[in-house]
Amino acid sequence: MLSLQGVRKSYGGREVVAGIDLDLRPGECYGLLGPNGAGKTTTLRLALGLIAPDAGAIHVLGEPVPARAIAARRRLGVVPQADSLDPDFTVAENLLVYGRYFGLRDSAVHARIPGLLAFAGLETRGAARIASLSGGMKRRLSLARALVNDPELLFLDEPTTGLDPQARHLIWDRLKRLVGRGRTILLTTHFMDEAERLCDRLAILDNGRIIAQGTPEQLVAEHIEPHVLELFGEGVGQWLDAHAARLPARFEKVGETTFCYLRDPLPALAELRQAGAMRYLQRPANLEDVFLKLTGHDLRD
């Protein structure tokens, strides 16, 4: 469905994409994770043929890109980071006009509009102006618009950023439905829980390179201890001085919280039950732990 082989791209002497190899299988949701500036959006732009690579080969649905990018894009759906809905048109008119970009007859788009609105949970909003929609409605409409040409492959660039939990869960449900119908999705996201819920496989990018790749479960098993204790509150420093050296654990301090990564949490838990005022949280390791271990805790701007 999508193949990138040795793809590189530089701007101003800085290599933003540094030799990426990537293959998407039909009917899967594949995630691209990475801190700001890791190369996720540039990778999408390269795959769409909006920019040309400095090296490497890209094929989208069998078409060489960028040479045949327009032919490939006729069979794609794209949800960009920022909403690009036309405020001068109603919800239904946005779908109609977008369909014309693909050379679809108005009659064909009109026939699809009720189903698209139902899919987005906007059945009663066809005549509404864009300004009257909530942020969640706009994102759902952007997703419906990306489906107007019945695409085989969808590119979603951070589709739930800025949405409340209810809107995020609704969009997750719609994306799962699309994969269930055989669509293939390439998804970029900053939400680790989103990646764990939606992605069959994913890659973690940093500094333009893929530093880990696999299923969410594989990445957690390969890169992080299975148990995590989060320590916070009064007395953490004293407790660590007394117990850290003899516990088979890895410790990381981030702000006011100390993370304790363990294969066996029972010895540490026995000690913590006697710790008095200090508070702690026990949980299984997750994709966010892997992400922070591999990319670091420092802010990226």
Image: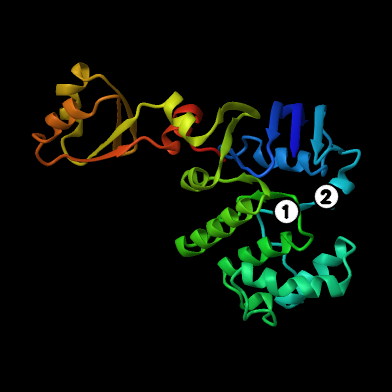
Q: How many marks?
A: 2
Report helix, strand or loop for mark 2. Answer: helix
Q: Give whichever of 11, 107 is nearer the camera.
A: 107
Query: Residue at position x 74%, y 38% from top?
Result: 2
Please indicate whether residue 269 sits to the left or right of residue 220 in the image.
left
Residue 78 is labelled as 1
Please indicate whether residue 82 sits to the left or right of residue 255 in the image.
right
Vertical order, 136 against 220 (above or below)? below
**Residue bearing mark 2:** 73
Q: Amino acid at mark 1?
A: Val
> Does residue 297 appear in the picture of this structure?
no
Q: Position of residue 264 (x, y in %)?
A: 25, 25
Q: Give whichever of 295, 152 is nearer the camera.
A: 152
Label 1: few (<14), some (14–19) or many (≥20) C-alpha neighbours in 10 Å: many
Q: Position of residue 206 (x, y in %)?
A: 59, 30
Dots 1, 2 in contact, CB < 8 A:
yes
Q: Position of residue 89 (x, y in %)?
A: 76, 76
Q: Amino acid at mark 2?
A: Arg
Looking at marks 1 and 2 on the same chain, the residue that comes earlier in the sequence is marked by 2
Query: Residue at position x 53%, y 45% from top?
Result: 190
Q: Quadrant of residue 144?
A: bottom right
